[in-house]
Amino acid sequence: MVTRSRCYLRSAVARLSISSPLDVRLLDKGMSVGEALAAFNAAYSEAGGVVSFLGKVRPDGDVQALELSHYEPLTLPGMEKLSENARARFSLDGALVWHRTGVMTPGEPIVLVATAARHRRNAFEAADYLMDHLKSAAWFWKREKRRGTWRWIEARPQDHLDLDRWK
Amino acid sequence: MVTRSRCYLRSAVARLSISSPLDVRLLDKGMSVGEALAAFNAAYSEAGGVVSFLGKVRPDGDVQALELSHYEPLTLPGMEKLSENARARFSLDGALVWHRTGVMTPGEPIVLVATAARHRRNAFEAADYLMDHLKSAAWFWKREKRRGTWRWIEARPQDHLDLDRWK
Amino acid sequence: MGVRILFLGPLQDLAGEAERTVAAPLDWAGLLSEVGPVIAEQLQVERLNIACGGRVLADKTSLVAEDGDEIALLPPVSGG
Amino acid sequence: MGVRILFLGPLQDLAGEAERTVAAPLDWAGLLSEVGPVIAEQLQVERLNIACGGRVLADKTSLVAEDGDEIALLPPVSGG
């Protein structure tokens, strides 16, 4: 488990508080995307650039639902370590990394990442880095329901190639 | 000027309407970042990935203000053409490109870009492409006020290198 | 108490259960024989990891689980 | 009416004014002599563009502005 001192930031416009410099969460239902981004932007008003990525369940043909399972003792600590790495590597002012678990339906958010940095290239690369790692190096297992039948999904070869870019 | 048919999208949660697939604006004051992103996310609920970039005036030492001037007959049409190019090149579902003009103070938004695509790499690359071009190939001239004195800014060599990545 | 074995992701379907508790202590050979041939075959796959007490083992064959330990069998991830 | 010349960005400071209206027609040589030596020198810079009637000229020396036209002198950009 990563240890650090946290300070909680609350903005006038955002009803939601986020922790700084890293806010890492596993959510078992819903995701307040708009509020999270508003709170993040407000928390890092001095950052020159803020990048966000929102991943949603694609209504892919006959996909009815998607389920993500995780392993509590590893998944969140792994996301925290990943976020620390991204912060150090890209000199981030801060990052937000939120991931859903459980059953989601098409259009629902799966993952929200936001990065704040002095320069835009760092913010872009950090968000890209976080997503590539969440996609193929975080402790999640995914299955899809099509025509009433659940099927486990394996990481795509492309996901591993994406990850290799950072090595 | 780019011609196209536009449809206006309005979501239940967003008070703001955006045009689809491209929403390109020059704003002479303010920028409703949170509402814009909420409307964009709602408009492209079927996109697998949504990326946003928000650029703000950095409180860089003694910078008191930043002013962006533009040339009406070229600036907005240029942004529209750029957005069309990004949409075609990265197979975007849609994009939002908003840019401020006039005087801004530290912490204020300068530019907001959002991209929606089926796959995350396309959404990331399109936002990156849009920003690189807005930074050094769009019709804006920038000056900064420090200690009461305005000084014109030239594009950094890094900005031109960033642009060359897409050639 | 014994040793609790968790089957994560697709292993759950192969095992037909989410977890099982077996007698302690448990080493690599003991695990292979406890889980049955189908799961045992999966455990040999290089990309399948094993965690014991919340830590992923660098060398899974070095497993030594004591009474009260939790073992997680972690197939290749397919996240986000 | 004449030809309206707009000085964009830093050219505005060099010119000491945002715009000026001069007699039509106006070609490249006429422009250089109208704007004075300081601006004329800037106009020779490759990265300085000229727009006439809302279109950037591929070859600025081919300028031919008629009565009522607007010319914009566009220094290198420094956007976003």
Image (tube, coloured by chain):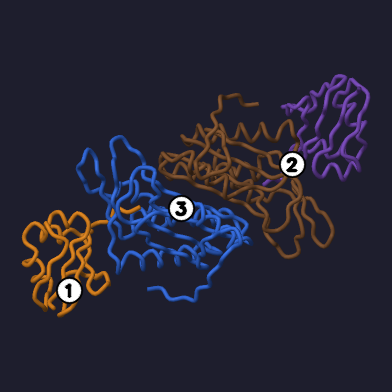
Chain colours: A blue, B brown, C orange, D purple
Q: Chain of mark 2?
A: D
Q: Chain of mark 3?
A: A
Q: Nearer the viewer, residue B89 or B32?
A: B32
What residue would you read off at disc 1?
A: C63
Give yes or no for contact between labels 3 and 2 (Cβ–Cβ under 8 Å): no
Q: Give the amino acid at mark 2.
A: Pro
**Which image quadrant: the N terminus of chain B?**
top right
Q: Chain of mark 1?
A: C
Q: Give the amino acid at mark 3.
A: Asp
Q: Residues within 10 Å of mark 2 (few under 14, many from 20)?
A: many
Q: Residues within 10 Å of mark 3 (few under 14, many from 20)?
A: many
User: Is residue D14 shown left or right of residue A74?
Assistant: right
Seen as rendered, the residue at the extreme front is B12
**Which image quadrant: the C terminus of chain B?**
top right
Give yes or no for contact between labels 1 and 2 (Cβ–Cβ under 8 Å): no
Q: Give the amino acid at mark 1.
A: Leu
What residue would you read off at disc 2?
A: D76
Residue D39: horizontal and vertical position, in percent?
87, 39
Q: Quadrant of residue D17?
A: top right
What's the residue at 22%, 62% (across, down)?
A: C74
What residue would you read off at disc 3?
A: A128
